[in-house]
Image: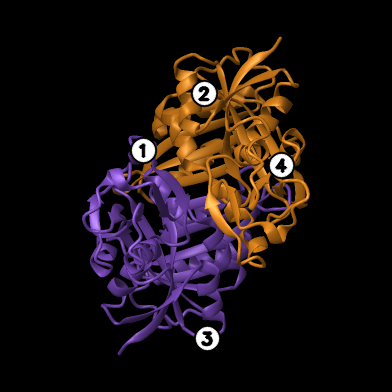
Chain colours: A purple, B orange
Amino acid sequence: MRKPIAIQGIRGSFHHEVAQKYFNNEADVIECMSFDTAVESLLKKSTDTIVMALENSIAGSIIPNYALIDNHNLSIVGEYYLDIQHNLLALEGKGIDTIREVHSHPMALLQCKTFFKDYPQIKLVEAKDTADVAKQIAEHQIEGIAAIASKSAARLYQLNILAESIQTIKHNETRFAIVMRENENLDKKGINKASLKFELDHKRGSLATILNVMSDCKLNLTKIQSLPKINTPWKYAFFVDVTFNNYEDYEKAQAIMEIMAQNFKVLGEYKNAKT
Amino acid sequence: MRKPIAIQGIRGSFHHEVAQKYFNNEADVIECMSFDTAVESLLKKSTDTIVMALENSIAGSIIPNYALIDNHNLSIVGEYYLDIQHNLLALEGKGIDTIREVHSHPMALLQCKTFFKDYPQIKLVEAKDTADVAKQIAEHQIEGIAAIASKSAARLYQLNILAESIQTIKHNETRFAIVMRENENLDKKGINKASLKFELDHKRGSLATILNVMSDCKLNLTKIQSLPKINTPWKYAFFVDVTFNNYEDYEKAQAIMEIMAQNFKVLGEYKNAKT
């Protein structure tokens, strides 16, 4: 059965690739030009599911996306890791010496900036979506402008690959979340990972105490990030991911953490994609 | 005595403002067009000190800058918190309806994107430096393009402020580090904060154990961030900031952590700028 899935970006984007892989090619993607728009489509019930990048092995967490999930009380129901490879794409028959500008997403430009040091004549211009630039170049046969996008975008829009894997750090893994309005994983079988958020006062040992509870309950920490609470000095929010073997262990830890931390919140319970 | 200080950006940038405030208006800034160039000038001894943004209350840590400090074994010797206010600047006598493009740093564009939703005709274009755009507009009397920059940039380049504080989240604090090749804070008096990096195996309770040591030694945690080690599955690096009242307490914790964690490293010891 085909499933409507809202993604940030268009067909040929990394989000599109994740949607296809996670849903075994059964995703009918709804193309959204921003993460905000994708979330709006979820809230308006145009779709039940969105795909959203959460963190990157190079640049770290995408805090604004965590904020979107948190502020709208959405639920992470799954995750997917994609190895991001950036390629330089242009019209067939055009060499890199004909390129004056590269348009791409700020994150892609950042990840490839070392490559462009050898081409000082090429101006880097921010665009909303990596794949959309490829599509525009193909549709309007634009010369002099190149895109940074995936090989699948090159195939989809029939562009030439001027240079492969142009990102500075070759292993470049991005973690994507599958997000719904509410967690539909009612069957807890197979659930072995959770994303949590809680707040603590700036008191010596407060975080250590919480981590001791997690450790005592046999939870493994796979991610932790502190964020000072805006407008609340000396209070910190923590985004934490944990994995576990038994759901009961996690439930026990959760019950204790709810008492010990402030504003404890489960952002999602799902199946660990790393094994 | 005037001090040569390398900054990312030009006069009128937020880095310039931090350099002036931290060094009581005695900074002779060396303008660098990237963080990499600023670090190069430090390594080539063109300067002994650089100013570098490290994290932002909205977007989180600037991981590539942590990597620059870490990879080149530089030392954080001080910190400064600046409340970042973004303003829309253009030539005198030009209204917002005459603006076709806004050029600015990707981070500034991200922080102001909600403001521009009301102006869909304005194209957002990535530029290297917020203040440089202001300077170019003023020098070449460029119409139709606006800059996002500080009020001090507006004064310096005599531009008109079309809109004040256009960032979405009004309280927008950025933490800057003062960075040298080596820590010259030989006198430990006044030192009450440290930035640390260490690695841990993905073993249950490994982080909790380290945090217990910190807590037992009366260290306060003000920041923690995990980062999966690229190409090393199941190994995590942690960037941690701690504050303390007695340097001896910190020394004791350091001695224990050096034994318990892997690749323990002090990125800097300095005076806490938040009191």
Please give the chain letter of the residue carrying mark 1.
Answer: A
Residue B55 placement (x, y as % from top left): 58, 42
Q: Amino acid at mark 2?
A: Ser
Dots 1, 2 in contact, CB < 8 A: no
Q: Which mark is residue A114?
A: 1
Please give the chain letter of the residue carrying mark 4.
Answer: B
Residue behind mark 3: A45
Q: Amino acid at mark 1?
A: Thr
Vertical order, A25 against A18 (above or below): below
Q: Residue at x 57, y 66 (%)?
A: A68
Check chain identity for marks 2 and 3: say if they share one: no
Front residue of B30/B235: it is B30
Q: Amino acid at mark 3?
A: Lys
Residue behind mark 4: B150
Residue behind mark 2: B75
Q: Nearer the viewer, mark 4 or mark 2?
A: 4
Front residue of B213/B97: it is B97
- Give the mark, 4 or 2, whose residue is nearer the N terminus: 2
Check chain identity for marks 3 and 1: say if they share one: yes
Residue A185 placement (x, y as % from top left): 42, 80
Per the image, label 3 sits on a secondary structure element best described as loop
- Give the mark, 3 or 1, whose residue is nearer the N terminus: 3
Extreme residue in the top direction: B1
